[in-house]
Image (tube, helix red, strand yellow):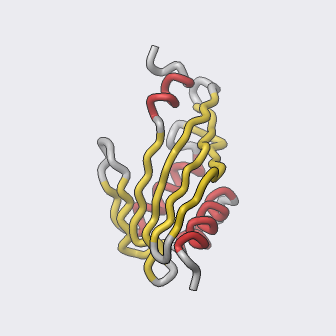
Amino acid sequence: MMTAGEVHRRIIELYEARRMDEGLALIDPEVIDHRGGTDGDHHGLAAWKDKWERAFSGGTGFHDASVTVEQNISTDDLSANVYLSRGTHTASGRRYEVRSIDMIRVRDGRIVEHWAVMDTTAMRRQLGLDQ
């Protein structure tokens, strides 16, 4: 059985490779994705799949999004990453590069909870959306 840190690394690899079916196998069917903001929490595997499908199709308004893990801290069931997140705003063609943090909780080799925070203020400034 993979540790939380191993699951975290693997889910990122599969996301970056756009290998959704393999990635979804690491997600518990009852996962809670604590997204915050106006969207609130997302519940269940279908919501996670929808999130990935929108990201892969450019439905989020961004394309070529990627992350580089700069730091990971993990225990048996928790793993937290500090990332450098990058991407291109589809409508303007402008690029962003900001810090993000996320954390997962793993049970029986699957993600059961996820939390994510991105510096959206810096991202909006870089994209010229707050001028």
Asked whether residue 21 appears in the rendered view, the answer is no
Q: What residue is at 61 percent from the left and 34 percent from the top?
A: 97
Horizontally, residue 18 falls left or right of residue 32, namely right
Q: What residue is at 35 percent from the left and 58 percent from the top?
A: 42
Horizontally, residue 125 falls left or right of residue 64, namely left
Q: What residue is at 31 percent from the left and 56 percent from the top?
A: 41
Q: How many marks?
A: 0
In this rendering, the answer to whether 10 lies above or below 63 is below
- Residue 72 quadrant: bottom right
- Residue 11 quadrant: bottom right
In this rendering, the answer to whether 32 lies above or below 130 is below
The percent coordinates of residue 85 (x first, y second) are: 59, 43
Q: What residue is at 64 percent from the left and 26 percent from the top?
A: 93
Residue toward you, 77 or 66: 77
Q: Which residue lies furthest to the right in this view?
A: 17
Asked whether residue 117 appears in the rendered view, the answer is yes
The percent coordinates of residue 112 (x first, y second) are: 40, 72
Q: Quadrant of the N terminus?
A: bottom right
Q: Residue furthest top?
A: 131
In this rendering, the answer to whether 53 lies above or below 32 is above
The percent coordinates of residue 38 (x first, y second) are: 30, 42
The percent coordinates of residue 5 (x first, y second) are: 57, 69
Residue toward you, 25 or 121: 121
Residue toward you, 7 or 14: 7
In this rendering, the answer to whether 57 lies above or below 108 is above
